[in-house]
Amino acid sequence: MSLHSVAMTVFQDQFTSTQTTVITWSVFVIALLAAVILIALIVVAVVVTKLVREVKEKINDLHAKSLPIISKADQIITDIKPKVQTISENAVQISYTARKKVEEVGEAVTKIKGTVLQVNDTVADANTKTRSQVGHVNDMVSTALDSTEKLTHTVVHGINEPVRQVAGLIAGLKTGFDTLVKNYQGTGPVKPFKTKSDK
């Protein structure tokens, strides 16, 4: 049964032949449009199905490729977790130990500073006393040198004076003997005396 027959049966008594023809053609055009839309929907459905299948395959490939990476990442995280916890605990311990050592160094520096101040005071006191002693020793040495110089001068004078006097006395005696011998022997030169050992 064709569309025309259906239209004619439904609307046979009420419409004229021109109206029936228009209605028939309208129904035909609507049916044709419905068929085109249906074909278009079928084509779209096929294309969408194909695209969905391709996307699904790509997702499966991506899933297959990413699954080992995710598994490896999970394994690395599982392996690293205790190490990170140990590192964190060690960092806390190091921080505590470092703080304690800094405090100990601070106390040691304070003690050293006190000791250095005491040593400074001791050195300053020793320096003052040494200067005083050096001045005292300098005075003593100067006095000793002055005394030694005076003593040397006195000794030299004490020795030179008698030696000069003895030399003067000997020169006087010699001149006296020479004169005596000259007078005794006459005017000739003085002859030395001969002793028993010379004969």
Image (cartoon, rainbow, N blue to C red):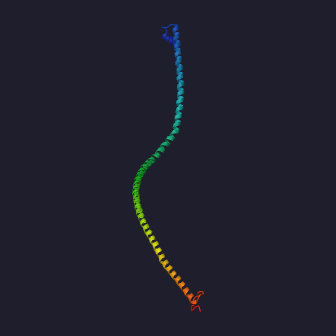
**In the depicted structure, whether residue 116 falls above or below residue 86:** below
- The reply to whether residue 2 is visible in this rendering is no
Residue at x 56% of width, y 88% of height: 183
**In the depicted structure, whether residue 15 falls above or below residue 151:** above
Residue at x 54% of width, y 20% of height: 36
Image quadrant assignment for residue 122: bottom left
Residue 147, image x and y in percent? Answer: 44, 72
Toward the viewer: 21 or 136?
Answer: 136
Residue 76, image x and y in percent? Answer: 48, 44
> In the figure, is residue 47 to the left or right of 90?
right
**In the depicted structure, whether residue 7 falls above or below residue 97:** above
Toward the viewer: 152 or 108?
Answer: 152
Report the residue that reaches farthest toward the top. 16
Toward the viewer: 166 or 190?
Answer: 190
- The reply to whether residue 91 is visible in this rendering is yes
> In the figure, is residue 101 to the left or right of 7?
left
Q: Quadrant of the C terminus?
A: bottom right
Report the residue that reaches farthest toward the right. 188
Toward the viewer: 118 or 164?
Answer: 164
Residue 24, image x and y in percent? Answer: 52, 12
**In the depicted structure, whether residue 188 falls above or below residue 90:** below
Residue at x 50% of width, y 79% of height: 164
Q: How many marks?
A: 0
Residue 188, image x and y in percent? Answer: 60, 87
